[in-house]
Image (cartoon, coloured by chain):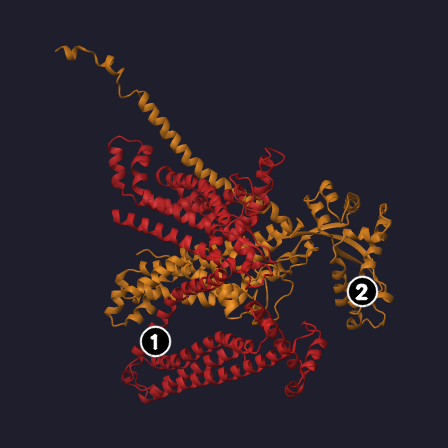
């Protein structure tokens, strides 16, 4: 029984439990609702929750964990030095899964009976698979076929137990709910406790997500540092991965590119965003403001892939025609730090401006009035009163923008180039941490190699840096807010 | 006495308040400058927006039309239907390669008919005017309608991407010679065909509903399958992120006690909102693909990753919407004997719904355009050329997604794909715009002032 059918079956059992329990209490109360502790549908929901929630939890948990356990069992059948490293084992494991799926396809297609399958020798089975044209390795090692058989049988057993347990749990819950249904049962209170529990669980998803991020980064990063010296990762000045081995994976050139591009982006975004915010908050006619502000904010709503394409195909060639070989001769290719930085800056303008707008508007009117009363002009008020008062908030906005810029991926993947280089020339192509995470994990690299695992170490660095920036920014903003409220 | 005899004017120049002095003039100048700077910044920002939109429209609109050559093709029965019973299952044996010579012959005949000189020795070179997919198109039409065999039928044949680009003004004579396939001689023939009225440009529905094509057939590439991939991902997000996000917001806003645990949840949510999207991609790769063995490139995995990403984007506005419901509503509900759950679910939540929905819709639009995490879970590099087999299969069979498809095209060598990428962006933005307009309409329709 597939996941979907089982899911629907549990839902159906719960629905039946709802209807039966509701009818039972109404019957016991002889149709008089006033004799019930709770409204009839609470009695139904009580049984329904008891039937559905534990069974569905088990179903999801089992479905997620079963493949992991089955893999463990199947892997334990590999032996010999051929499968020593985890990389070879995981490769073999994916082969096992494929063979098992192919056998499944054979059985489904009716070409192979279940009894036949057990009597068939490994060689014959391999030939059978070859004949059907299913792409498997031409000469399968017997270990793989053997493991595939075990994989299939363990999976099948697991599926069967899952089916039984889930249905049993659902029926048991339904039966308990039905038998407990009684006019005096505090069904509303119990149901509400159950709903409260579900709400707490939903709120905890955020914690689990953070946990998941930290764990998935941490484990793979530790794995990486086990096979690659941490000192070289942090201090080496070269980044030259080669999938054959002997790579040099120093993070410094990537950090340099990241910071350089972010700096250019901020040089574009901060003045433009800040002045826009000041103009819109202090000078603009309300009509102009109500038209210009949402238009500027359209820039944040545009997906980053669009900016990436814009950098690659419009801004890059345009800059190149001025600064490239045809013009100044500084820019060897269309993709460059300046291309990515400029486009990222455009993306960040509304981000800076709307955050600054908020903090500027939060400065109390009394401070403006005081300044005007002393004879200051508007610009003097802005420069000497409003900006200093809003400064912590503005700094916070800039830090948040910086964290955005550092974590931005698509613009740099398309616009910044692929070469890891440390140079001061903004017209040269450089690359960033995010771009390298993408390139190291989208190749065909073996997951256990340092060249792939380094992406997790890069991700960890990125996570820590952006998290740090955000915490500092939020702390600054929060402290500032307390001053005036 | 002597002090007052000094005239005021000789101390500081004239001091009429009606006439500005030097210092005041300077201050006013700097005031004007400052204002101009601000206006300039706003205008620069808007200018960038205009440039961006203009380049999207200018580069993308051509993708929505496609060039066809109207050529009469003779369909000889002895080649296409050897059995002679016009039975499609027998005629299926003639592959696309069997149709190619027919098209070549048809082109030669047309040139001769119209008095255009045949500039090539080899018919195959002339046939480069047509897409590699043209023969497949003819084959499909013949199989759909076997009675065509034996006749000479006018077909609209898909032109190759370069010829298409030439008619659209994307390709010129200088650039075509740099390419390997076509020469400017082809373009002469193309000009002649156009004069004869055999060239037709029409709306390219296949671009919107069609599948992606391989590297050498950009003229056939479409976003249809990728669009389905995006749709399935959004379905996952709607099914998971919306209930979980709203439930979390309800808990935090209405029920959570003030304690460490609540603080922990809140800190987590605000931090997750700021985690770079690529990190969510890493999470998806490590947790869903490596650990849980879910299939690569599956919309299910993409949807799960986007769910986790959009949760904070849903929770934060939903909390604000719940907070905006005035306490008097809560007190009134409690006052007439509702339990706290009843108060929340029957009174507060319905009133907060428009605000919650607006947040949900905006976060869905964001999720639709998100690209970076999809790169890591294998939705790029997969050529989305097959439609999923059914509803459930759509979640697990490998697919691309609209933004991933755009990225894929922007990485291909043939510039003809760039036109497709821009076109894909128009499709993406139209969807996002529609979603956002829906959000605005909802807000206008249901907004309440207390």
Q: Nearer the viewer, residue B145 or A269?
A: A269
> What residue is disc 2 on?
B148
> What shade does chain A have?
red
Question: Nearest the camera: B51 or A392?
Answer: A392
Q: Where on the picture, by quarter, is residue B273?
A: bottom left
- Give the quadrant of residue B124: bottom right
The residue identified by callout 1 is A194
Tally of marks: 2
Question: Rounded to the nearest whole Å, what is the CA distance between mark 2 and mark 1?
Answer: 68 Å
Q: Is residue A466 left or right of residue B88?
A: left
Mark 1 Cα shell of 10 Å, populated few (<14), some (14-19), many (≥20): some
The percent position of residue A432, horizontal first and vertical second, equals 51, 49
- Residue B375, visible in the rendered structure: no
Name the image quarter holding the N terminus of chain B. top left
Q: Can residue A172 be seen in this view?
A: yes
Q: Judging from the image, what is the letter of the chain drawn in orange?
A: B
Q: Which residue sits at x=36%, y=63%?
A: B249
Chain of the residue that carries numbered disc 1 in the rendered image? A
């Amino acid at each position: 029984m597939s996941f979907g059918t089982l899911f629907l079956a549990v839902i159906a059992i719960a629905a039946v439990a709802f209807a039966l329990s509701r009818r039972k209490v109404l019957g016991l109360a002889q149709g008089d609702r006033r004799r019930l502790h709770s409204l009839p549908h609470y009695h139904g929901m009580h049984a329904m929750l008891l039937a559905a929630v534990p069974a569905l939890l088990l179903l999801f948990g089992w479905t997620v964990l079963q493949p992991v356990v089955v893999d463990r069992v199947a892997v334990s059948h590999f032996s010999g030095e051929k499968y020593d490293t985890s990389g070879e084992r995981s490769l073999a494991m994916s082969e096992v899964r494929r063979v098992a799926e192919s056998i499944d396809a054979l059985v489904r297609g009716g070409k192979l009976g279940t009894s036949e399958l057990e009597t068939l020798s490994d060689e014959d089975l391999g030939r059978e698979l070859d004949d059907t044209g299913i792409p498997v390795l031409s000469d399968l090692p017997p270990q793989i076929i053997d493991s595939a058989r075990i994989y299939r049988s363990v999976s099948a057993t697991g599926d069967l137990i899952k089916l039984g347990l889930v249905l049993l749990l659902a029926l048991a819950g339904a039966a308990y709910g039905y038998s407990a249904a009684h006019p005096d049962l505090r069904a509303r209170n119990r149901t509400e406790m159950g709903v409260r529990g579900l709400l707490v669980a939903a709120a905890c998803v955020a914690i689990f997500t953070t946990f998941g991020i930290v764990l998935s980064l941490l484990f793979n990063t530790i794995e990486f540092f086990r096979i690659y010296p941490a000192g070289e990762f942090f201090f080496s000045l070269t980044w030259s991965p080669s999938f054959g081995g002997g790579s040099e994976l120093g993070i410094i050139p990537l950090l340099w590119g990241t910071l350089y591009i972010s700096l250019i982006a901020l040089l574009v975004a901060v003045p433009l965003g800040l002045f826009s915010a000041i103009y819109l908050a202090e000078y603009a006619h309300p009509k102009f403001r109500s038209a210009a502000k949402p238009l500027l904010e359209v820039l944040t709503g545009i997906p980053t892939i669009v900016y990436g394409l814009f950098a690659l195909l419009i801004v890059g060639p345009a800059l190149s025609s001025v600064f490239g070989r045809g013009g100044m001769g500084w820019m060897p290719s269309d993709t460059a730090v300046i291309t990515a930085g400029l486009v990222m800056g455009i993306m960040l303008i509304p981000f800076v401006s709307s955050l600054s707008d908020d903090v500027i508007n939060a400065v109390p009117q009394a401070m403006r009035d005081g300044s005007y009363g002393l004879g200051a002009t508007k610009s003097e008020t802005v420069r000497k009163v409003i900006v200093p008062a809003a400064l912590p908030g503005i700094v916070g906005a800039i830090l948040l923008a910086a964290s955005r810029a550092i974590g931005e991926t698509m613009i740099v993947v398309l616009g910044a180039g692929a070469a890891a280089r440390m140079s001061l020339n903004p017209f040269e192509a450089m690359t960033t941490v995010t771009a390298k995470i993408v390139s190291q994990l989208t190749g065909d690299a073996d997951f256990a190699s340092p060249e792939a695992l380094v992406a997790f170490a890069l991700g960890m660095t990125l996570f820590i840096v952006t998290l740090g920036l955000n915490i500092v920014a939020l702390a600054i903003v929060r402290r500032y807010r307390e001053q005036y409220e | 006495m002597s002090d007052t005899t000094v005239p005021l004017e000789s101390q500081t120049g004239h001091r009429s308040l009606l006439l500005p002095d030097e210092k005041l003039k300077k201050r006013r100048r700097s005031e004007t400058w400052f204002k101009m700077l601000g206006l300039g910044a706003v205008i620069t920002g808007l200018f960038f927006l205009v440039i961006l939109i203009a380049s999207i429209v200018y580069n993308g609109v051509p993708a929505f039309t496609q060039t066809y050559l109207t050529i009469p093709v003779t369909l000889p029965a002895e080649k296409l239907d050897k059995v002679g019973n016009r039975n499609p299952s027998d005629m299926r044996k003639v592959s696309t390669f069997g149709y190619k010579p027919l098209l070549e012959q048809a082109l030669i005949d047309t040139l001769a008919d119209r008095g255009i000189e045949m500039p090539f020795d080899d018919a195959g070179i002339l046939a480069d005017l047509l897409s590699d997919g043209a023969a497949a198109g003819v084959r499909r039409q013949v199989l759909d309608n076997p009675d065509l065999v034996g006749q000479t039928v006018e077909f609209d044949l898909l032109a190759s991407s370069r010829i298409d680009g030439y008619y659209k003004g994307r390709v010129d004579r200088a650039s075509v010679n740099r390419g390997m396939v076509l020469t400017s001689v082809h373009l002469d023939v193309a000009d002649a065909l156009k004069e004869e009225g055999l060239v037709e440009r029409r709306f390219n529905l296949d671009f919107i509903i069609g599948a992606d094509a391989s590297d050498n057939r950009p003229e056939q590439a479409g976003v249809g399958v990728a669009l389905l991939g995006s749709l399935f991902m959004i379905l996952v997000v709607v099914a998971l992120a919306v209930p979980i996000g709203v439930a979390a917001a309800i808990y935090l806003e209405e029920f959570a006690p003030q304690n460490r645990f609540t603080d922990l949840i809140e800190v987590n949510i605000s931090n997750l909102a700021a985690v770079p999207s690529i990190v969510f991609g890493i999470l998806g790769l490590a947790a869903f693909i490596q650990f849980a063995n879910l299939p690569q490139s599956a919309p299910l995995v993409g949807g799960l990753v986007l769910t986790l990403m959009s949760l904070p984007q849903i929770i934060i506005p939903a909390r604000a919407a719940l907070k905006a419901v005035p306490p008097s509503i809560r007190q009134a509900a409690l006052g007439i004997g509702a339990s706290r759950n009843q108060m929340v679910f029957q009174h507060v939540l319905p009133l907060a719904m428009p605000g919650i929905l607006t947040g949900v819709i905006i976060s869905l639009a964001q999720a639709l355009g998100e690209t970076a995490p999809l790169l890591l879970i294998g939705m790029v590099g997969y050529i989305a050329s097959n439609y999923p087999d059914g509803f459930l299969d759509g979640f697990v069979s490998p697919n691309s997604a609209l933004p991933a498809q755009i990225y894929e095209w922007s990485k291909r060598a043939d510039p003809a794909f760039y036109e497709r990428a821009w076109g894909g962006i128009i499709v993406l933005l139209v969807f996002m715009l529609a979603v956002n307009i829906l959000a605005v309409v909802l807000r206008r329709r249901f907004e309440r002032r207390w």
